[in-house]
Amino acid sequence: MAGSRPGGLIAGAWTAMMSLGLNGYLDSTSRIMEVSKKIQRGIGEIPGLFVIGKPDLTVVAFASDVVDIFEVKANPGPISGGMAPIYGAAGKMPDRGTVKELLVEFMDSSC
């Protein structure tokens, strides 16, 4: 439902809500929040990385006190595409069990 008017977004949201129902919506929200918390814990377990702030929802910002992010961006290496590989990934994963693998592979390819 692409377009420049907000009606398409509202119609899409309404359709999703009608399809899921209240319980389906709450279940999906709970699972999404669990993945967000798992990503936060995973980042916290990687030496040199830390989560910025205390994310209340699903946007998780992180930084490093040992890795220069500008250096990583300037020299991404042959297999790294920067953050692009994980952009939106958790929301699209049918198997949320792969979040840990995603974190490990991202760090292995970027640093």
Image (spheres, grey):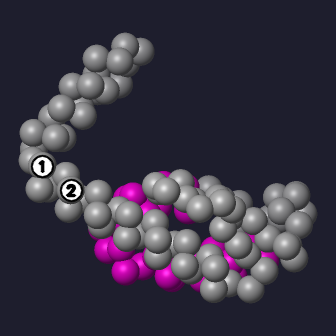
The residue type indicated by label 1 comes to Leu
The stretch in magenta equals: 86-111
Can see residue 81? Answer: no
Q: Which mark is residue 56?
A: none
Q: Nearer the viewer, residue 25 or 98?
A: 25
Q: Which mark is residue 22?
A: 1
Q: Main secondary structure of the magenta part?
A: helix
The residue type indicated by label 2 comes to Leu
Q: Nearer the viewer, residue 14 or 77?
A: 14
Magenta stretch: includes residue 89: yes
Dot 1: what SS?
helix
Residue at 71% x, 72% y: name it.
50
Can see residue 106? Answer: yes
Q: Name the spot of residue 55 as percent of width and height, x first.
A: 55, 59
Residue 42, image quadrant:
bottom right
Dot 2: what SS?
helix
26 vs 69, left or right, is left
Q: Name the spot of residue 111 as percent of width and height, x first.
A: 78, 77
Residue at 49% x, 56% y: name it.
56
Q: Residues within 10 Å of mark 1 (few under 14, many from 20)?
A: few
Q: Name the spot of residue 47 as percent of width and height, x first.
A: 74, 86
| Residue named by callout 2 | 26
